Amino acid sequence: MSFEKRYVIAVDIGTTSTKTLVVGRDGTVFASHAVEYPLFTPEPGAAEQNPDEIFAAVIRSIRESVRKAGLSASQILCVSFSSAMHSIIAVDRNGHPLTPCIVWADNRSARYADILKRDGKQIYMDTGTPIHPMSPLLKLMWLKDERPDIAHKANKYIGIKEFVFAKLFGRFVVDYSIASASGLFNLRRLDWDERALAAAGITREMLSEPVPPTYRLEGLDPQHAADMGLSIDTPFVAGGSDGVLANLGVDAVGKGVYAVTIGTSGAVRGVVRSPVADPQGRLFCYALTEDYWVVGGPINNGGIMFRWARDQLATLEAEQARSRGLDPYDYLTEMAAGVSPGSEGLVFLPLLAGERAPFWNANARGVFFGLSLNHEKRHMVRSVLEGVVYRIHSVMSALEEFAGKAVEIRASGGFARSPLWRQMMADVLGTKVAVPDTIESSCLGAAFIGFYAMGEASGLHEVSGWVRTGSEHVPDERNNRIYGELLQIYNRVYHRLKDEFDEIAAFQQKYGRGSE
Ligand code: ADP
């Protein structure tokens, strides 16, 4: 191995783990390491993590990946970062945390969405972050009201990546995309938004300094540098959020190329060259650089719907699969493949966990519509898979209004393991679906930003040389027509049930059935 500085260490601070890759100039991954940590729910609606534990995981995952790749510090060009969006930690004057890291899934600020109704729309139009409890803006409102003792002592409010940088460099900086997802950052000016700051009741001094993703931090704390196997001169690159970097990592950067991820939850995202604000509030828009923004929508009910069907509807079949040494998902997918597209008129609204984009209705609930005596379990399983793709279709329709017609989908997440599910997506959306061979797309996106920041790439388009696609699915015209008819029914059923969703959610709350 030569001693040129040729490798970027890419770190993705996620909700379940921190993953680190060692990446070469052509996108080759030489080593990886992940360190997990828990999520705490000390009270209903809470979702918290220990920031010191995450910091330790970052240090360890960097050290281990450097060791596994057999690199010396002199071979490392830089360390570049991705992290989950929407986290918030109150810190005191010395940067010590006064709260745990409150993550996106924390719902305790839900009622502030209503309180913000008057100013909320303008704030959304200016910041691109939906007015939703995931947003740090609402979390700050909650904290000020319900934890006044902490708010009183807080010197700054920062996200998890800023916390890590502060410990390593003694500085508070935040990249544009993480800032963008805070609900406090003006998308056009790329600076903190006065109206949002006023709504949160804080000043800009209480937030970090916004910097582009290519911003470099230098002057690493010597002890931490030694712990990671790095030199004190190794630059750290600010990078971005996992959502926007995932688009880079699957090369969904060009016009009409959209990234669709369906893991436990799901998301659709596209890259645009100017900020988008949807007057109907259906989409998010986050800045990536001064020239690129990522627009899209998240869904709660992604692969978790298939898991629910496996565990609740098809328990017996899942058991049979396991006893034969088969993956229950593969077995159930095979069952579903025996049913024709459209599940013989059975439509599933997969809204069991409430829903985010495009209609942001936490009270929405699941519906099987059209059940008749000829429907069997395999129809129900197929309709669950189809229903998840209908959800993607709803988000995609809103997205196409702003970002242009889809010409290609880049599919990732657990669902992409299933050829049937991928073909279904091509048929429902009427768009080619390709599967990039990327494993950790956000991490790979961070690695690319690292090379770009160090002057080793001329623009984001160059990422295309890093990503190869495997299987491709072309829409079947007949199936596309069938799904087109069902989608109209699906959409009408959804809109007609608006009041009933509220009523049943209220009933469930009253009689003890949890919601999201
Ligand atoms: P996470 O979002 O937690 O990282 P994954 O991306 O691994 O999770 O996605 C998990 C989901 O992927 C499961 O809930 C399931 O819906 C789906 N999935 C996993 N394996 C398969 C498979 N073989 N066929 C179809 N779907 C699958």
Image (spheres, rainbow, N blue to C red):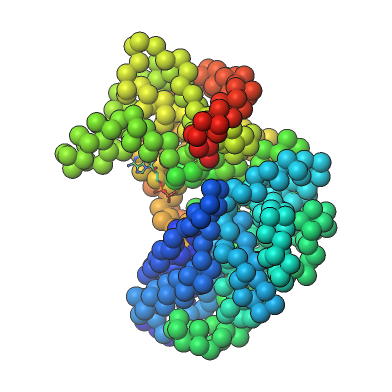
Left or right? Give the position of 463 relative to 436. Answer: right
Q: Is residue 14 above or below residue 44?
A: below
Quarter-of-image position of residue 472: top left
Quarter-of-image position of residue 501: top right
Residue name at image x 43 percent, y 18 percent: 346
Q: Nearer the viewer, residue 492 or 268?
A: 492
Q: Nearer the viewer, residue 499 or 374?
A: 499
Q: Nearer the viewer, residue 487 or 325?
A: 325
Asked whether residue 194 appears in the rendered view, the answer is yes
Quarter-of-image position of residue 234: bottom right
Q: Is residue 477 above or below residue 451?
A: above
* Quarter, ligand 1: top left
Residue name at image x 35 percent, y 15 percent: 375
Taking the view exactly as shown, the residue that stands out farthest to the left is 324
Left or right? Give the position of 90 relative to 191. Answer: left
The location of residue 330, given as percent across then percent down, is 29, 37
The location of residue 365, given as percent across then percent down, is 53, 29
Asked whether residue 247 appears in the rendered view, the answer is no
